[in-house]
Image: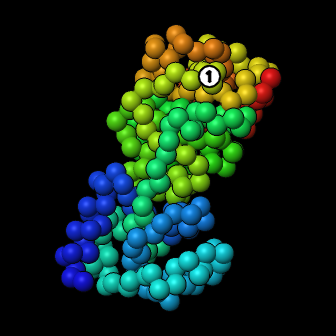
Amino acid sequence: MSHQTLVERFRGARSDPSLALLEGFHPIKHAIRFGAELMEVVCLNVAELARLTANHAPDIAGALDGQVTEVSADVFEELAPLAPPTGVIAIARRPTVSLTELLNNPALSPVVLLERPRNLGNIGAAVRVAAAAGAAGVLTIGTQDPWHPAALIGGAGLQFALPVTRTAALPVCDRPLVVIDPGGDPLPECSIPARAILAFGAERAGLSSQLMATAERRVSIPMSAGVSSLNLATAVAVVLYSGRFGQ
């Protein structure tokens, strides 16, 4: 395999909607744990990667056997705009997510909806929180792709742990829509219906009038005087971990 062919494949994967580019050990670790299909793994030092795996994720050690190609530092630095410090990068197949199946899931867990989020790192961090808290899935509306390499770094690859997809608009479904809004009932006293869609707006723009108008309930996060907003992922964490669901 030529140096140029390898670089072109990794650069092409960045914009391929069927693929996920995993920059660094932690996204790769979680992708493997949640059943990702790895197509190519490249590292700076196979022995160092083995030590990293043994120390931080021994459960995935066998998954990388025979799949890793070692390359020089010059080549590795061309595979991503900023070479990951853990010295490993991979291409995986992006899972297919059915929006219908996600919304019709009978489990009581909420779905997180991010409307027009702007920062890819925040999107990834919100996915990471949602996965940790056991959310049913994460939907985004807007131009940013929740599977962008930067979002995968922010999410530590936990996009593979639950359904994550982008949609043009929220389809009609039987899940109650709950918007996070400063004028809503304050947490943790208020209750949130089971199977709710929890809608979060971008820090600057907030939620659209369309979502606000169709919401079944409005919930607010109490904050000290003079504080007008929280980081998106922090807001998602607060609601998922302090909300009273199913009442």
Q: Is residue 233 left or right of residue 17?
A: right
Residue 227 is situated, as x and y percent measured from the top left of the image, at 58, 25
Question: On the image, which quarter does residue 236 sit in?
Answer: top right
Q: Image point 50% across, 89% down: which residue?
A: 47
Identify whether 100 is placed above or below 213: below
Q: Is residue 79 left or right of residue 40?
A: left
Q: 238 or 227, which is in the foreground?
A: 238
Q: Amino acid at mark 1?
A: Asp
Q: Image point 49% across, 45% down: which residue?
A: 97
Q: Is residue 231 visible?
A: no
In the rendered image, the quadrant that contains the C terminus is top right
Residue 134 is situated, as x and y percent measured from the top left of the image, at 69, 45
* Residue underneath mark 1: 174
Q: Image point 64% across, 37% down: which residue?
A: 105
Q: Is residue 167 left or right of residue 185?
A: left
Residue neighbourhood size for the residue with mark 1, other residues' Cα within 10 Å, grouped as few (<14), some (14–19), many (≥20): few
Identify whether 64 is placed above or below 39: below
Q: Image point 54% across, 28% down: which residue?
A: 200
Q: 197 or 48, which is in the foreground?
A: 197
In the rendered image, the quadrant that contains the N terminus is bottom left
Identify whether 109 is placed above or below 223: below
Question: On the image, which quarter does residue 73 sit in?
Answer: bottom left
Residue 222 is situated, as x and y percent measured from the top left of the image, at 69, 23
Residue 40 is situated, as x and y percent measured from the top left of the image, at 39, 73
